[in-house]
Amino acid sequence: MTSDVSRRYLCLWLPFLAADRWRHETGSDDDRPIVFVEKAGGTSRLSAVDARAQSCGLLPNLTLADARARVPQLRALVANRAVDAAYLEHLADVAGVVTPSVALDTPDGLALDITGCVHLFAGEAGLAERLQTVLQAAGASSVRLAVAPTPDMARALARFARISPCFATDSALVRTLSVAAIECAPEDALALKRAGLKTIADVANRPSVLFTARFTPAFTVKLARVLGEEDRRISPVRAVSPCRVEHRCVEPVLSQDMIQTILVRLVAEAGDVLCARGEGGRAFEVQFLRADGTVCRICVETSLPTRDPTVVMRLLRDRLSALVDPLDPGFGFDVIRLMVLRTEQYIESQTTLDAHVEQDDQISQFTDRLSTLFGPHSITRMLPGDNHIPERAQVVVSAASGSFSQSRCEDWIAWGSNCSRPILLYRQPQAIEVETDDNDDPVRLRWRRVLHHLGMANGPERIADEWWLAPSDYGTRDYFRVESKEGQRFWIFRADATATVPSSGKWFLHGLFQ
């Protein structure tokens, strides 16, 4: 597939990622050569080095003993690949200041799709300069980058070109690179050099069928991508949101009032975009990008699609006020970005006299505010479940998981038809003592040391376990609706011999009627 010349990718390489991360975390100004060591096959070997150690001839895979013999004054640290990976993800967040499409190029690089973003920085050079500035503020002092029509070409230039930053519009520059830029297997690179093919141009000028026969089809595919003849889309760390608006500040913003003003403007702008699409938002995320590279995020969700700026701003204000650590602008925010992470079709509804509709909307908005303040999983509600076992006949879901019209009283007809089910149901049925008459109907029950004389008993109603599901602890049950002479109404059942719950009897109280 021929690549689209209008697309532009930026790849950056962090050759001393581990050292940059360590210095950024510790603030150390130690000028000794620094190496990072990990165990490999029972031997301590270098996994990463800093620039000073590299200038002394120390490279990864060298044993620590050899490294100390060459440079006695070096400083050895234990490698931590998990922390390095987390730092790379942090740098990916920081790189989001120039484009929302940022992918990890593990273990020490990033790939950015900057198509359509260049004009915001007065050209690719301005974008590269801005990116280097924010990355250096985040601790990445050693950055090499290149811009090219395909990510593989940009990667090759970032890692093997002599200049940085490097800007390429065709394959002329990448053809001058060594065959090592193809990043094939070491034995394949050695075979190419022995054949006198030292540069990518030497390989590209020969028929690809020769290399397919000698090596593998993957080699020719990689060569085509490095030459820009075939494109490969990157996979961003964060999916590009369907709606995204942002405000770039001329000067870093510190005032909370100004931040609120910018948010109001962004929410209104996002609402106009959603209105034009006939959609509403269900999840909104605000990103605050500080001048020092720190990215702060707050996210709110709604139970119904909305594009009302008043509703969204109220949730954002509640979320900001509920933060354990107040929003710290530091030296100021350079960019404030609003992203609608999830959208759904928004159906305009005409004003109606049905009080249920207005009540549902008010309950949904109230629940959204509670979920914003206390967390989306702290506020729950119950929906009917497709099961006739009483304790399984309802499911607990997040209150913000959908419209409240789904859980109104008419949806519980199967559960409460003819008032045969109590409003209060105990999570764990409580053991009771029951005396029965000659027909085996309950006439007295003792619950919590109190004896109740029954004046009415309606039943039994038999409920058995489903054979296709895991059995309950009570086996087949015979339920009775009973009422004491004092007017108390109970929902009790008698378990059969297959019950496995530990109890001295076979009668249990499961719920109370109101």
Image (cartoon, rainbow, N blue to C red):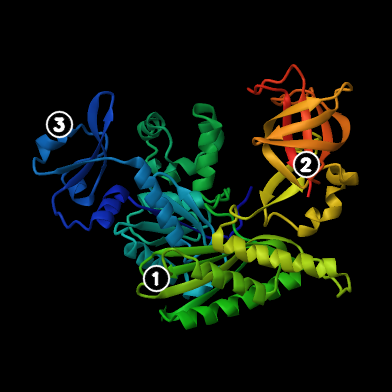
- Which quarter of the figure has residue 307? bottom right
Q: Is residue 162 left or right of residue 151?
A: left
- Mark 1, residue position: 328
Mark 2 Cα shell of 10 Å, populated few (<14), some (14-19), many (≥20): some
Graded by Cα atoms within 10 Å as few (under 14), some (14 to 19) or many (20 or more), the crowding at tag 1 reads: few
Residue 65: mark in rendering: 3
Residue 385's disc is 2
Determine the image quadrant of residue 115.
bottom right
Residue 348, quarter of picture: bottom right
* Amino acid tagged 2: Gly
**Left-right relation of 32 to 460:** left
Q: Position of residue 213 (x, y in %)?
A: 54, 27
Q: Secondary structure at mark 2?
A: loop
**Disc nearer the start of the sequence (3/1):** 3
Residue in the foreground of this view, choosing between 322 and 18: 322
Question: Neighbour class for label 3 at 10 Å: few (<14), some, many (≥20)?
Answer: some
Q: Evaluate whether residue 176 shows in this view.
A: no
Which amino acid does the dot numbered 1 rest on?
Asp
Q: Of callouts 3 and 2, which one flags the residue occurring earlier in the amino acid sequence? A: 3
